Amino acid sequence: MTTRVQRAIEQGDIGDLRARLDADPALANTIIRWGPNGKNPSVPLHYVCDMVFEGQLDAAAALPLAEALLAAGADINALHEYHGDTPLIGAASLLVEDVGLRLVDAGADVTARGLFGATALHWASMHGLTRLAGALIEAGADIQLPDTEHDGSPLGWAVHGWKENKAGVPRTQPDVARLLVAAGAPVSPELRDFLDPEADAPFLRAIEQA
């Protein structure tokens, strides 16, 4: 069943969302079940990013909705019941950079690990979210932490995102790599060997000039 909070988020109706939350602030942390047979459980903060990623919500509407949820007491470190992603990890993995930046500013845990044992910095690195990656590094995110699935560091995830070149993902992974290396992330010989001198020249220049 579609709830009023769910509908307000889907429609980007900030006025209706605030009215619902004013009447019952607990709704800011009430799980929304969506998708086929309601199989996907998301807290409202995560659901905002889900809807942007699904193309049902304009990205420009995401931040005001997130602000309303935060004002109502939304838990910035709520764990997804399936994979443990926090709203910050969700924002990074679903390419909703402005919401991710707001959550960092609000004090979200930048060390939290979710799906694949990855942090928000892993996802921001893979998707080339330069502003968010910079904010995460400044907030103390671990720049060398390997994920638990592929043993990849954030720099390794940046390489993966660059190589994958998925539609809709910015080609700014070299900029993130530059930030990571400047912050002290090591560049292994194996990583250098994985990069092609011609096809991956922008990435190689980034890690060499950091």
Image: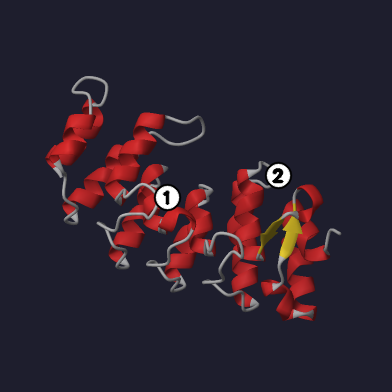
Q: For the residue marked with disc 2, what is the amino acid?
A: Gln
Q: Is residue 40 above or below residue 128?
A: below
Question: Is any atom of residue 208 visible in this view?
Answer: yes
- Quadrant of the image containing the N terminus: bottom right
Q: Is residue 63 left or right of residue 23?
A: left
Front residue (pair 40, 151)? 151
Label 1 packing within 10 angstroms: few (<14), some (14-19), many (20+):
many
The residue shown at (47%, 53%) is: 92
**Residue 74, image x and y in percent?**
61, 74
> Which structural element holds mark 2?
loop
The residue shown at (67%, 73%) is: 29
Q: For the residue marked with disc 1, what is the amino acid?
A: Trp
Q: Is residue 167 left or right of residue 18?
A: left
Quadrant of the rendered image containing residue 184: bottom left
Q: How many marks?
A: 2
Residue lying at the far right of the rendered structure: 1
The residue shown at (28%, 46%) is: 155
Residue 56, label in figure:
2
The residue shown at (65%, 43%) is: 54
Gap in angstroms between the C-alphas marked 2 and 1: 22 Å
Label 2 packing within 10 angstroms: few (<14), some (14-19), many (20+):
some
**Residue 191, image x and y in percent?**
21, 38
Residue 123, label in figure:
1
Q: Is residue 62 above or below residue 165?
A: below
Question: Is any atom of residue 128 visible in this view?
Answer: no
- Quadrant of the image containing the C terminus: top left
**Residue 95, image x and y in percent?**
50, 47
Quadrant of the rendered image containing residue 2: bottom right
